[in-house]
Image (cartoon, rainbow, N blue to C red):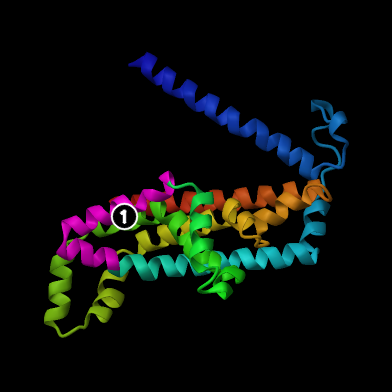
Amino acid sequence: MRRGRAGAWLVLVVVFVYYLVPMIAMTRFAFQRIPVIKLSFGNLFDKWTIAPLIETFKEPEFRSSASLSVQLAIATAALTLILLVPTMAVAHLRSKRMRRMIELSSTLPFVVPAIALVVGFAGAFRETLPMFIRSPFGLVPLYVITALPFTHRALENGLAALDLRTLVDASQSLGATWYRTVVFVIVPNIRASIATAAFLALTVVLGEFTIASLLLKNTLPLYLSYSQGQNPQGSFAVGLVLILISTIFVASSNRLGKVVRS
């Protein structure tokens, strides 16, 4: 038993160091005004500044790309919830086969590479709906698919924890329509799962690079990739901020997930 605990702690320490050391190096590069070749333990606390981050925030290209990414993230989270919550509720009520099909479909983004998804998307809509390809918001359906493995699992846990049949029957016996049942009965009972799914969708969009790059949309990850040659300290500083935001989202998701399970 003691050896097992010692081994578990050893693994945790190794993983912690594996992530911590690059983060420290990235932080020093981004926020210390010292040439990289001169960085050492002796000047660990010297010449720290947030000027690279402020300078990046002032750039018009950064503001436009950040604004676009935030809008895409919000639109993706909203569309995900609008599509999944009623669909999965119907599947839980009426068909186990439908639940299995949805669950299988949610794993496809792990199997189908992003480049294949983009090629199929562009080929399908280039002639029929060219405006959909040219618009940055054409990324939203692709982001919904990309985030599906995470958002589906969060909502599935919340719905599985409910006695959904009893709630729906009680609501409809009082004269509520399906819309009112979803909005005023189902949604309040799975609000923690909904918040978790929204956080996960936001995290996926803020970090997604491949799809935006292939469709030539200037999102925040794409901006950070291109700006490393001109302002490497600023791009690394913004990258750290994104990591912090994503960590907060994931931690909030885990916290809300515990609330759902309890």
Q: Is residue 206 above or below residue 167?
A: above
Q: Is residue 262 visible?
A: no
Q: Residue at x 45, y 61 (%)?
A: 144
13 or 152: nearer the eye?
A: 152
- 75 sits left or right of 215 in the view: left
Which residue shows up at 68% across the image and 62% down it?
Answer: 218
**What residue do we see at 80% from left, 63% from top?**
59
Numbered circles on residues, count: 1
Residue in the foreground of this view, choosing between 82 and 197: 82
Q: Is residue 93 magenta?
A: yes
Viewer-proximal residue among 160 and 231? 231
Quadrant of the rendered image containing residue 25: top right
x and y, in percent, of residue 102 in the image: 29, 56
Residue 190 occupies which quadrant of the picture?
bottom left
Q: Which residue is mark 1?
A: 260
Q: Position of residue 21 (x, y in %)?
A: 66, 31
Which residues fall within the magenta stretch? 87-111
Query: What amino acid is at disc 1?
Result: Val
Residue farthest top in this picture: 3
Dominant SS of magenta comes to helix
Considering the image in quadrants, where does the N terminus appear?
top left
Up/down of 175 relative to 118, above or below: below
**How far across and down, in percent of the image, does residue 173 sit?**
11, 80
Q: Which residue sits furthest bottom? A: 175
Q: Secondary structure at mark 1?
A: helix
Q: Is residue 42 left or right of residue 73?
A: right
Q: Is residue 70 magenta?
A: no
Q: Residues within 10 Å of mark 1 (few under 14, many from 20)?
A: many
Q: Position of residue 114 (x, y in %)?
A: 51, 50
Q: Quadrant of residue 73?
A: bottom right
